[in-house]
Image: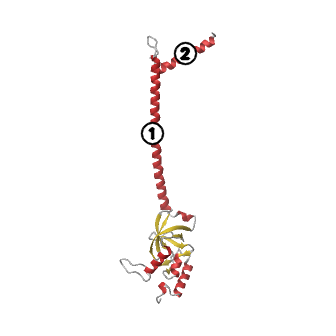
Amino acid sequence: MKLSTIFKFLIIIAILIFVLYYFTGFEFLPSKFNLSGFDSLTNKLNELLTNFKKELSRIKELMTDLVETLKQELFGIKKLYDLVKDIITPHSEESNSDFISARILRVIDGDSIVVEIKGKSYEVRYIGIDAPEISDLDKPAEFMAEEALEKNKELVSGKIVKLEKDVSETDKYDRLLRYVYMEDVMINAELVRLGYAYAKSYPPDVKYDDLLLKCQREAKENKLGLWSQNQ
């Protein structure tokens, strides 16, 4: 046998001895040689494998908890973002268009309504008009107040309308200030034209003042509604 082959064989034996010593401490080499050392090695390997499985299971549990925590945190962040977005720009659709669709929830009186926009309700005050006040605890209803309320209901109740903004977003009562359209008809102007409301300028929201004054002249000439009495 060549010397180099013997040398390689000895190296392999040395490596095996080192491995056995590392894992068993030569417990498999008692005073009399037997195979008990290999049983010890097998037991240690099984123990290592069992511990490894336990660690994997623990890591899996930690990862699951981490994922759930991240989901909750992301959900909280999204809710906070939506809240801030609603506070800062509650009607963000209007930034891309002069008009926004809304569903009528309730008609309050002759010049104000409650609408739903993207799942949220808002009170809307018609721009450029002033309808008679309905009765409250302090004073009776003004002339044509009930008629104006009923006409407003007839025109918009339960329908989908379009809202147009002028300059101001809200009034001092935090109501949206809008021109309201049913198809191609501006409800603000229609109520004035039929004599259920007065044309009234509220600067800086004066975009359709001329149109509303024209409608008022028409109602006055025809003695409709509010103009049916001597003025």
Estimate the x, y position of residue 125 in percent, counting from the top left: 48, 73
Q: Which residue is mark 2?
A: 13
Q: In this rendering, is residue 77 above or below 111?
A: above
**Amino acid at pointer 1:** Glu
Estimate the x, y position of residue 138 in percent, counting from the top left: 36, 78
**Amino acid at pointer 2:** Ile
Estimate the x, y position of residue 53 in percent, counting from the top left: 46, 32
Looking at the rendered structure, the secondary structure element under dot 1 is: helix
Q: In this rendering, is residue 159 above or below 19?
A: below
Residue at the top extreme, as displayed:
1
Q: Nearer the viewer, residue 111 or 36?
A: 36
Q: In this rendering, is residue 48 above or below 165?
A: above
Q: Give the residue drawn at x 44%, y 82%.
A: 144
Q: Nearer the viewer, residue 131 or 159?
A: 159
Q: Which residue is mark 1?
A: 61
Q: Give the residue drawn at x 45%, y 24%.
A: 44
Q: Give the residue drawn at x 48%, y 66%.
A: 116
Estimate the x, y position of residue 152 in percent, counting from the top left: 48, 76
Q: Earlier in the sequence, mark 2 or mark 1?
A: 2
Please state the total of marks drawn on the protein image.
Answer: 2
- Apparent side of residue 177 relative to residue 142 in the rendered image (left or right): right
Quadrant location of the N terminus? top right
Separation of marks 2 and 1 at Cα, in angstroms: 43 Å
- Discs 2, 1 touching: Cβ within 8 Å: no
Q: Nearer the viewer, residue 34 or 135?
A: 34
Residue at the left extreme, as displayed:
137
The disc placed on residue 1 is: none
| Colour setting | secondary structure
Q: Dot 2: few (<14), some (14–19), or many (≥20) neighbours within 10 Å?
A: few
Q: Dot 1: few (<14), some (14–19), or many (≥20) neighbours within 10 Å?
A: few
Looking at the rendered structure, the secondary structure element under dot 2 is: helix
Q: Give the residue drawn at x 54%, y 85%.
A: 218
